[in-house]
Amino acid sequence: ILPLLWSCLCAAKLTTLPNVDALTNFEERLTIMEQEVYRRLNTTERVLGQYLTGRNNTNLAGLDVLALRTGILDAQLKPVIFSAYKQSSESGISNHVTIRFERTYINLGNHYHTENGIFIAPVTGVYMFHWTIVSGSSDFSTQLMVDGTPRASAYVPYPGGVDSSSAMAIIEVNKDDHVWIQIYGSSEYVYGGSTSIGSYYQSTFSGILLQTS
């Protein structure tokens, strides 16, 4: 910011002040030059404040520049990623019931909530979601829900034994939207399992912010 301020001042030459060279009183000349410096500094602060915040009527002098810089860096350095899995199998799941994935491999930002199986988008942007459901009861569908609206679905077949189905969707999600996976079927069984060797059946739900918008 300081180099930008200096370049703005240097670009506006003080020697071009009207009639300043005609003044013989040194104090008068100094006073006029000081007033012009303050005027141009105020203009620069206003322009930079609007540029940094994107809001009108914002002055750089009224901003906590260090906090603003920290906020910008935090937004750039904090990715949004989660990958959750279902630890325990669950039966009797029916239409519109949210599948809860109780544990996470990773949950940067803690935007996925294991207590209810819902991811809450921290920012508006383009997200990629992936889910795998393992079952062995009957064929049914799962839906990727965003604030109560189905945005994608996957079919879970039943060939007479245990089977699984995976799906991926890249969609735009608004800030504070709730995202979850729900069942579209009747009295279904969803497998869960630990991460230990020998645990073959595991249902998962993952998401990542690709870019903000």
Image (cartoon, grey):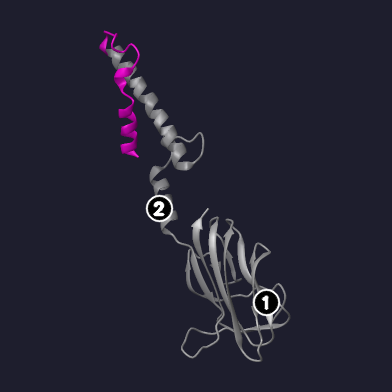
What number is the disc on residue 38?
none
Question: What x and y, as percent, mark residue 168?
Answer: 56, 71
- Mark 2 lies on residue: 73
Residue located 52% across and 88% down the image: 200
Q: Which mark is residue 141?
A: 1
Amino acid on which the number 1 mark rests in the picture: Ser
Instruction: Select label 2 or label 1 by which is in front.
Output: 1
The magenta segment is 1-26
Figure quadrant of the N terminus: top left
Q: Nearer the viewer, residue 29 or 184?
A: 184
Q: Going 66% across and 91% down the picture, which residue do you hit?
A: 160
Name the image quarter holding residue 166: bottom right
The amino acid on which the numbered mark 2 sits, given as a three-letter code, is: Leu
Horizontal side of residue 176 vs 197, given as left or right: right
Residue 21: quadrant of the picture: top left
Q: Secondary structure at mark 1?
A: strand
Residue at 42%, 55% (x, y): give it: 76
Figure check: 1 above or below 144: above
Location of residue 123 in the rendering, given as x and y in whole percent from the top left corner: 53, 56
Give the Cα distance between marks 2 and 1: 41 Å
Is tag 2's residue or tag 1's residue first in the polypeptide sequence? 2
Question: Was residue 18 drawn as part of the magenta stretch in this picture?
Answer: yes
Whether residue 91 can be seen here: no
* Residue at disc 2, secondary structure: helix
Does 10 appear in magenta?
yes
Front residue of this view, candidates 115 and 109: 109
